[in-house]
Image (cartoon, rainbow, N blue to C red):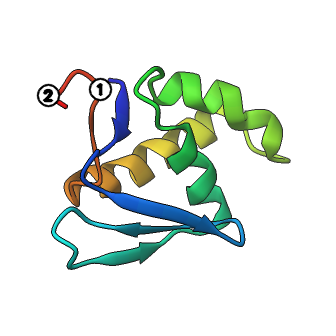
Amino acid sequence: MRLRRSPEVTFEVVDGRAILIDGQGTELITLNPVGTLVWNALDGERDSGQLANDLVATFEDVTVEQLEDDINAFVEELRSSGLVVEADAAR
């Protein structure tokens, strides 16, 4: 499944960390640098496997499978908070 950042989320990257504000303006989330890398890659064009393949060279001693599992877990957290949506969802 291809996911993208929710258009209702406001974000800014400061010192390599994304700061997200949910659509209601009630929750502020600061991502670590790895989370920020994934957040920036959530363009709706790639699924988690493609993201892992594209990003794996960035990390040492991580397999594509491990990275895909980590991306899936991270993205599911974002999705359950309404911060990401399916790419085909209404904009």
Q: In the image, what residue occupies the spot 66% across and 25% down?
A: 53
Q: Is residue 67 above or below residue 16?
A: above
Q: Residues within 10 Å of mark 1 (few under 14, many from 20)?
A: some
Residue 54 appears left or right of 48? right
Q: Which quarter of the rendering shows the C terminus?
A: top left
* Residue 67 place in picture, x, y as percent: 61, 41
* Residue 34 place in picture, x, y as percent: 64, 57
Q: In the image, what residue occupies the spot 22% across and 74% down?
A: 25
* Badge 1 vs badge 2, beta-carbon distance below 8 Å: no
Residue topped by disc 1: 87
Residue type beneath disc 1? Ala
Q: In the image, what residue occupies the spot 80% across and 42% down?
A: 58
User: How many labels sit on residues?
Assistant: 2
Secondary structure found at label 1: loop
* Residue 6 place in picture, x, y as percent: 29, 45
Please state which of residues 21 and 54 is positioned toward the viewer in this rendering: 21
